[in-house]
């Protein structure tokens, strides 16, 4: 499967809005939405975040199909926070998260010259924890239901 990451664009909102309203997709994230996400609010969100200078927000495509998002946020001179979700459930378990994560980490360490990338993962999200360990992330602390993991550019 050919996996690429590309910067988010406004038209992605028409797909991602359905993911934001799917509780299963966001089951283990810190994001829970009290109200239904509308296309207008999703368009507003995308247009706002793609302008942020300290973020790198990308769409994940697998064989030309937009299947999820992957981000670096809170980018500073040394570090950034990593986020990912695969919204198209028929693409779960196919290695797309691993491939897109490797692309993003390469960008973080080679292009942005970061020293550290970190993430927060729900302790029950064993599939994600397994992936992060495979990528080289190690646990650094626990806060409530979340484990902080990090990978350093050495």
Image: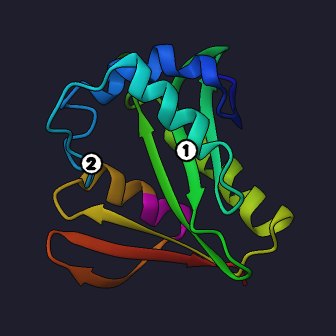
How many marks the image carries: the answer is: 2
Label 1 vs label 2, nearer the camera: 2
Element under label 2?
loop
Q: On the image, numbered disc 1 is attached to which residue? A: 70
Is there a contact, CB below 8 Å, between mark 1 and mark 2? Answer: no
Give how far across and how far down residue 76 sits, in percent: 68, 76
Element under label 1?
strand
> What residue do we see at 64% from left, 57% from top?
55
Query: Of helix, strand and loop, which mostly describes the magenta segment?
Result: helix
Viewed as shown, does residue 111 lie left or right of 141? right
If the image is split into quadrants, where does the C terminus sit? bottom right
Give how far across and how far down residue 135 sits, in percent: 54, 61
Viewed as shown, does residue 139 lie left or right of 3? left
**Does any portion of residue 17 appear in the rendered image?**
yes
Mark 2 crowdedness (10 Å alpha carbons): few <14, some 14-19, many ≥20: few
- In primary-sequence order, the first of circles 1 and 2 is 2
Is 70 or 62 nearer to us in this picture?
A: 70
Q: Does the segment drawn in magenta span residue 61? A: no
Q: Which mark is residue 31?
A: 2
Magenta range = 132-136
Distance of label 1 from label 2 (alpha carbons):
15 Å
> What residue do we see at 59% from left, 50% from top?
101
**Does any portion of residue 95 appear in the rendered image?**
no
């Amino acid at each position: 499967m050919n996996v690429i990451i590309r910067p988010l664009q406004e038209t992605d909102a028409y797909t991602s809005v359905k993911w934001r309203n799917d509780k299963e997709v966001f089951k283990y994230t810190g994001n829970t939405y009290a109200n239904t996400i509308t296309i207008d609010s999703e368009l507003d969100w995308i247009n706002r975040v793609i302008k942020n200078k300290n973020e790198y927000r990308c769409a994940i495509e697998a064989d030309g199909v937009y299947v999820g998002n992957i981000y670096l946020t809170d980018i500073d001179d040394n570090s950034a926070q990593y986020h990912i979700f695969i919204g198209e459930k028929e693409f779960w378990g196919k290695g797309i998260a691993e491939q897109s994560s490797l692309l993003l980490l390469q960008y973080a360490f080679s292009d942005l010259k970061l020293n550290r990338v970190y993430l927060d993962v729900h302790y029950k999200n064993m599939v994600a924890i397994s992936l992060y360990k495979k990528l080289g992330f190690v646990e650094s602390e626990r806060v409530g239901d979340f484990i902080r993991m990090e990978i350093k550019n050495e």
